[in-house]
Amino acid sequence: MKQKNINKSNESITKRTDLAINGAEPAFSEPLHVGRPNIGNRELFLQYTEQILDSRWLTNNGPVVRELEEKIAEYHSVAHCVAMCSGTIALEIAIRALKLKGEVILPSYTYIATAHALHWQGIRPVFADIDPQTHNLDPDAVRQAVNSRTTGIIGVHLWGRTAAVEALQEIANEHELKLIFDAAHAFGCSHQGRKIGAFGDCEVLSFHATKFFHTFEGGAVLTNNARLAEKMRLMRNFGFAGVDNVIYPGTNGKMTEISAAMGVSNLQAIDKVIKHNHLIHQAYQQALAGIPSLRLLEFDQNESNNYQYVIVETTEDCPVTRDHLVEMLHAENILARRYFWPGCHNMKPYRDLYPESTSNLSSTEQVSERVIVLPNGSCMDRASVEIVAAVLQVALEVPIADQTSI
């Protein structure tokens, strides 16, 4: 049965005049998004909502927040989950709890919040290059960036594919550095058979609405370090240890009960969501296999993956620029994205603050110019994937010289 959102089939997209950028009808009547919010067990969420309203316990470490923390810690096989109001606040609190200062090494190819969490606390973000195959931090680049002012490393599990955990830990141990992993993409993912959460000193999750697992807005820190977890619990609640007893400088990083209710409800449906994401990723594998100008990033089938992101790279001999390809997709209401272009180091705050940081980031710049993130999630089915692939196939038959006429 044809979806209401589909205006034309993949079989009807065979030549350049069929493309919306040339005046044809868009392939989809409504936008297909990257990261459209999932809604898990709606009935369970409404039950929790009634309980929260009846109890009038809306925030301040309520029972639903504590339930969510317990369930997430169990899901990731770690001792402690400290829920927060956002992933960014979770990262900032983790950084402060670990007493980072001076300089901290991180990839430039990440969401800007990773760098902001350092800069807001007077710490200089030092951008190191990535491995062009994995898109994660290159340990050799990290090692070269270490100096007497370095106090920590933030690795990012980009796209849910885990960073070079052992190599980064070896560098951290050698130079007595703290190691944090930004695991915003990696909920439910594993490294060598172990779920993320217990690597480094701690790992930071994001539960923003665009993540496949979300709490409307929120985040958390996972760790096996009891002392660190207790410190972060104090810090997220102004340093209160009981009524009228402030024992540590803190801020307001608490998660609300209603956000936790959405998290518990979504956690119950998580296996179904991951299965759907996996099926869509497999559909993309099949549909894009005949397009030599695109490389689909694969996931290790021996690991747990959430398959949230469908990432393609344009090849060096691609006949159409990445940006023009995105423009053609947008005309079809396929809202593909250019994550994480142009890299944190090329964004105005850090470009102006640290102009010298643009050196030695050649792989970061190359990857950021090639990556396209395609729609995935509950809004997609196999028919939608085949239409996206048909648009890409036709678009990539157009030589560079003809792009202005598309």
Image (cartoon, rainbow, N blue to C red):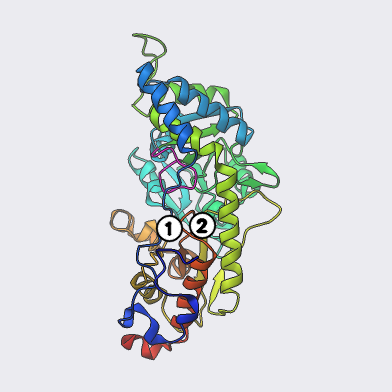
Callout 1 environment at 10 Å: few (<14), some (14 to 19), or many (20+)?
Answer: many
Vertical comparison of 111 with 335: above or below? above
- Residue 48 place in picture, x, y as percent: 44, 27
Q: Residue at x 54, y 56 (%)?
A: 136
Q: Quadrant of residue 330?
A: bottom left
Give the main secondary structure, helix, strand or loop, of the magenta stretch: loop
Residue indicated by mark 2: 309
> Which amino acid, by three-letter code, is at mark 1?
Val
Q: Quick check: 238 above or below 44? A: above
Q: Which residue type carries mark 2?
A: Tyr
What's the distance in space between the residues labelled 2 and 1, CA to CA?
8 Å
Residue 98 image offset from top left, x and y in percent: 48, 31
Which x, y percent locates residue 7? 39, 71
Q: Give 20 or 255, whichever is nearer the viewer.
A: 20
State the residue lying farthest toward the front. 1
Residue linked to disc 1: 34
92 is within the stretch colored magenta: no
Nearest the viewer among 6 and 372 is 6
**What count of labels does the image hold?**
2
Please say whether residue 214 is one of the residues in the magenta stretch. Answer: yes
Q: In the figure, residue 99 lies in which quadrant?
A: top left
| Magenta stretch in the rendered image | 207-217
